[in-house]
Image (tube, rainbow, N blue to C red):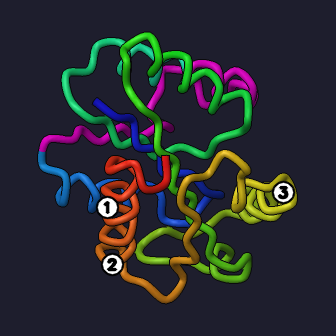
Amino acid sequence: MDIVCINGPINSGKSTVGRCLCELLPEAQFVEGDDHDAPEYADLDTRISVSLARIEALIINANTDLVVAYPLRAEDYARIVAAAARRGAGVFVATLSPPLAESLRNRGTRALSQAECTRIVEMYEEGYADRRFTNFLLDNAALTPIQTASAIKAALMAWRAGETR
């Protein structure tokens, strides 16, 4: 079992690409990291903590690969690695890194709020688009979600084969 984390800033395509990747990895289960039980008015740290606790529980109880769409900080990555290690699972991180201007555009059916645009800029400044723990970094601005998922799958297969572990 492996945990495939789709990392990146808001509006980089994590959820869409994660769902496409699950279509290419039919035994994998998709996890939307932002699905949690924290109230919407909760502060960011509380929402992150609740989200990560849910992801950790899913890892502990998983019977198959998980594809997790969630923006990762170093401490979040460490929590996921620790949970995966308890299960004997590997962790592969693919970071989506379109240019900032692309992430600030309304893509697909999503209309960004001003608060989201502000947070996107902050996330780029904080390094979400280029984490040091990334196994595969991809500028997906010119790619369709399925092309992006296919590239991630190829990198994942190489990683599993030991070429880049």
In this rendering, the answer to whether 60 lies above or below 64 is above
Asked if the residue at tag 1 contacts the one at tag 2, i.e. Cβ–Cβ closer than 8 Å, the answer is no
Q: Which residue is mark 2?
A: 147
For the residues carrying marks 1 and 3, which lies nearer the camera in this image? 1
Q: Which residue is mark 3?
A: 122
Residue plotted at (40% across, 62% down): 155
The quadrant the N terminus occupies is: top left
In this orientation, which residue lies closer to the viewer: 52 or 67? 67
Q: Circle 2 sits in a helix, a strand or a loop, which is it?
A: helix
Q: Is 37 a magenta residue?
A: yes
Q: Picture coordinates of residue 38 (x, y %)? A: 56, 21
The answer for how far apart the CA atoms under marks 1 and 3 are is 29 Å
The first of marks 2 and 1 along the sequence is 2
- Amino acid on which disc 3 is placed: Glu
The answer for how far apart the CA atoms under marks 3 and 2 are is 27 Å
The first of marks 1 and 3 along the sequence is 3
Q: Picture coordinates of residue 24 (x, y %)? A: 19, 60
Q: Which residue is mark 1?
A: 153
Q: Which residues are magenta?
A: 27-50
